[in-house]
Amino acid sequence: MDGDWRGVLYPARLPTLHRVAPPEPVAVWVRWFWIPQWHLAPGRVSRQEIIAFPACNLAVEPALVGLAGPSTRRSFRDLTGRGWAVGALLRPAAVPHLVEDPAAIRDAYLTLDLPDLHAAVTTAMTSDHEGGLRRSRAVDAFAQWLHDTMPTPDAEALAANAMADLIDADPTVLQVEQVAAMLGVSVRTLQRLARHYVGLPPAAMIRRRRLQEAAERLRREPDIDIAAVAHDLGYADHAHLTTDFRNVLNFTPSAYRGTTERHERPEKSDRGDPFTDGGQLDPHG
């Protein structure tokens, strides 16, 4: 899954971030696992910035296990020194088993007391095996913990997964009413599912997908007309796209496009390896 950088504002700075598809038994709980590792020279700082997916992330770090709530704005983390994390971009069905109200942890990182998960993943990531085998064993350990911990999803949880999948995968979906009709539920039911399983309204989930796609278009096609991007993604006009950018990213599409060339130059660590991060370590993949 490496190379899928939707949501990462400056992906050239992340050449060694690994995204791993979940084993089939836990695919109902996890969209993908992500594993960043970095090693920076003394005094160096790497700022990683993302437009997060509308989801929660469960992350194992050397000192803790954290649950990142859904974000409402651009996220970043400043990396220094040396470190790693193993995270899971959670599908909605997993969320209520980790936090009662995901909306209460919007833009926050909640430390969880999950010693078994922490011990299993840390053992894999700090072993003497080569990097690929360490990562594989860490993902297996994480997946096994989820398999042993999470109950079988009920019909409502599966409906929440279907809602998120539809919103994220279908670029023609622009309105909440479309999603409700395609899933055969009422708008009120859809809003309840989003509140309980995601922590964001379905309209915000749709806006996030469109904003990620807009940023990716501007990054990949630096000469494209911004009004054309707005039109292609279903915005009423250039001004509405600009408003979305300002509200979430705190800069305009033009300003973002102007920074991509400067920020897209990969930097190197003191080992000669590219530094990397999974966005943030209360991250969203």
Image (spheres, rainbow, N blue to C red):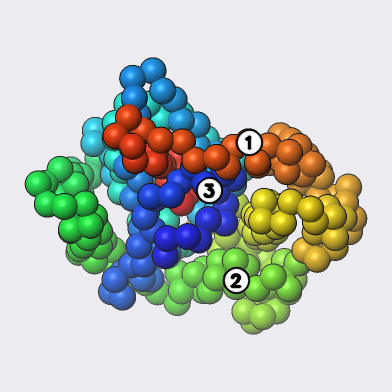
| Residue 68 position within the rendered picture, expressed as x and y whole percent measured from the top left | 44, 43
270 is higher (above) or lower (below) than 280: above
Residue at horizontal 46%, vertical 30%?
46
Q: Which mark is residue 270?
A: none
Residue 64 placement: quadrant = top left
Residue at horizontal 38%, vertical 50%?
16
Q: Image quadrant for the N terminus?
A: bottom left
In the rendered image, the residue lying farthest to the front is 272
Tags 2 and 1 touching, CB below 8 Å: no
Q: Which mark is residue 169?
A: 2
Identify the residue under disc 3.
Answer: 11
SS at badge 2: helix
In the rendered image, the residue lying farthest to the top is 43
| Residue 147 position within the rendered picture, expressed as x and y whole percent measured from the top left | 24, 66
SS at badge 3: helix
Is 23 left, or right, of 190 in this rendering?
left
At label 3, which amino acid type do we have? Answer: Pro
Distance from the alpha carbon under mark 3 to that under mark 1:
12 Å
Residue 154 placement: quadrant = bottom left
Distance from the alpha carbon under mark 3 to that under mark 2:
21 Å
Of the residues under marks 2 and 1, which one precedes in the sequence?
2
SS at badge 1: helix
Residue 132, can we see it? yes
Q: Which mark is residue 262?
A: 1
Of the residues under marks 3 and 2, which one precedes in the sequence?
3
Residue 166 placement: quadrant = bottom right
189 is higher (above) or lower (below) than 275: below
| Residue 137 position within the rendered picture, expressed as x and y whole percent measured from the top left | 18, 58
Of 187 and 56, which appears nearest the observer?
56
Tags 3 and 1 touching, CB below 8 Å: no
Q: Residues within 10 Å of mark 2 (few under 14, many from 20)?
A: few
